[in-house]
Image (cartoon, grey):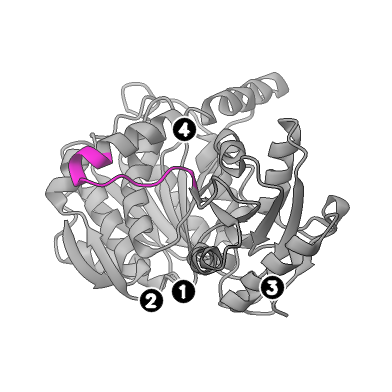
């Protein structure tokens, strides 16, 4: 691996390029690109590296919209080539029809979403609503804490998505500016390492001249229902293939990427804070500080949101008396006024398992507001004093 100081945008663009080029002995690769703040540098990096000859058997489609960018990726992928792109916020809204199509066509496209607040009013700072609006449409979703996690999981995403047990697209999510424009030391894989890690893409339903077929035509109700049922059964194969990807990664690179859900001081915790993305770094530091004061608080980071790691979550929260789910997102009009999307799935997971724990939801960082250690400490104090959970509580306003 190459040790470099770089932003998540550069790291994503570089990793996409070498992973695409790793399929040069197969059908090659391709991407549709269109700029939007704060994602633009991702596709700029791909274009620059392409011009430098880093993509030997590939094609870049400079399109007129995000909708067309994903449309180009669909065309590339159905032809059996490796496809990838990136977008953000309102760009994802414009791309929405084809984002859903990519999953329903079972195409292993990989996309970086730089999480940004949807507008108007226009706001370019971090919030998770843009990726979470696709939570129910068959995209694997991974929320990255730092730039290294992004790089590692782009490589793994191609391996997982292209596996014949899976064949679902993957979405790698990073917080706007906090990661996209922040430089940090990152170990970037070399082209030789990407070649060794990734098998050549073999898409079983590739469109060929010898066996032409129609995709996206009219389907009768029973056909659609059967298709959705197959997707529901097969998306949970992601967990087993994820372990394969971890094993393969560890063997090649000498370190093991974390599980879909990761605990920290969780074994004996009386209070568990459940978090995702960059807020995890702040919460981890607060947990470490409070532990030194004798406060039994722990943390569980949900890295993979789809498919949701229910079994692992239940194991990690263990015997904790109280759980605080910290969400950088909000769903208006949710049942019981529990607006945090991660909180909704945590509660559903625990209750379905018969584990009726005390779960309090906190909304933080909306519109890109800072999530400081003081806010996290205030959440710990608040949940410790509560006798009963209530509707989502907003912090940091």
Q: Distance of mark 1 from mark 4, alpha carbons?
A: 28 Å
Q: Distance of mark 1 from mark 2, alpha carbons?
A: 6 Å
Magenta region: 249-262
> x, y (%) of residue 108?
41, 39
For disc 4, the neighbor class at 10 Å (few under 14, some 14 to 19, many from 20) is some
Q: Tag on residue 378?
A: 3
Q: Distance of mark 3 from mark 2, alpha carbons?
A: 27 Å
Q: Distance of mark 3 from mark 4, alpha carbons?
A: 35 Å
Answer with mark 3 or mark 2, whichever residue precedes in sequence. Answer: 2
Mark 3 vs mark 4, foreground winner is 3
Mark 3 vs mark 2, foreground winner is 3
- Most distant residue in the front direction: 294
> Is residue 243 in view?
yes
> Is residue 24 in view?
no
Q: Tag on residue 178?
A: 1
Q: Which residue is mark 2?
A: 182
Q: Does 197 appear above or below 84?
A: above
The verdict on residue 250 being magenta is yes
């Amino acid at each position: 691996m190459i040790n470099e100081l770089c932003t998540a945008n550069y790291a994503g663009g570089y990793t996409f390029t070498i992973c695409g080029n790793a399929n040069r002995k197969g059908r090659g690769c391709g991407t549709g690109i269109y700029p939007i703040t704060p994602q633009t540098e991702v596709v700029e990096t791909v274009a620059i590296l392409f011009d430098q000859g880093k993509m030997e058997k590939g094609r870049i489609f400079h399109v007129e919209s995000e909708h067309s960018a994903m449309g180009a990726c669909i065309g590339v992928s159905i032809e059996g080539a490796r496809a990838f792109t990136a977008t953000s916020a309102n760009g994802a809204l414009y791309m929405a029809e084809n984002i859903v199509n990519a999953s329903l066509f079972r195409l292993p496209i990989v996309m970086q979403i730089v999480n940004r607040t949807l507008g108007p009013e226009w706001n370019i700072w971090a919030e998770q609503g843009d990726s979470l609006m696709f939570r129910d449409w068959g995209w694997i979703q991974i929320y990255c804490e730092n730039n290294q996690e992004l790089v590692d999981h782009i490589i793994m995403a191609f391996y997982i998505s292209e596996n014949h047990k899976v064949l679902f697209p993957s979405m790698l999510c990073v917080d706007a500016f906090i990661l996209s424009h922040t430089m940090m030391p990152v170990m970037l894989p070399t082209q030789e390492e990407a070649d060794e890690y990734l098998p050549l893409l073999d898409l079983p339903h590739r469109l060929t001249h010898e066996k032409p077929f129609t995709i996206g035509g009219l389907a009768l109700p029973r056909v659609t229902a059967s298709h959705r049922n197959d997707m529901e059964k097969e998306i949970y194969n992601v967990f087993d293939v994820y372990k394969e990807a971890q094993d393969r990664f560890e063997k090649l690179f000498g370190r093991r990427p974390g599980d879909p859900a990761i605990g920290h001081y969780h074994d004996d915790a009386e209070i568990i804070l459940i978090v995702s993305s960059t807020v995890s770094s702040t919460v981890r530091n607060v947990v470490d500080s409070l532990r030194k004061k004798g406060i039994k608080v722990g943390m569980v980071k949900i890295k993979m949101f789809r498919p949701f790691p229910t079994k692992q979550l239940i194991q990690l929260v263990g015997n904790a008396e109280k759980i605080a789910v910290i969400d950088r997102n909000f769903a208006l009009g949710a049942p019981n006024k529990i607006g945090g999307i991660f909180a909704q799935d945590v509660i559903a997971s625990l209750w379905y398992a018969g584990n009726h724990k005390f779960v309090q939801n906190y909304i933080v960082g909306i519109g890109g507001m800072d999530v400081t250690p003081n806010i996290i400490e205030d959440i710990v104090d608040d949940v410790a004093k509560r006798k009963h959970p209530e509707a989502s509580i907003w912090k940091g306003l």
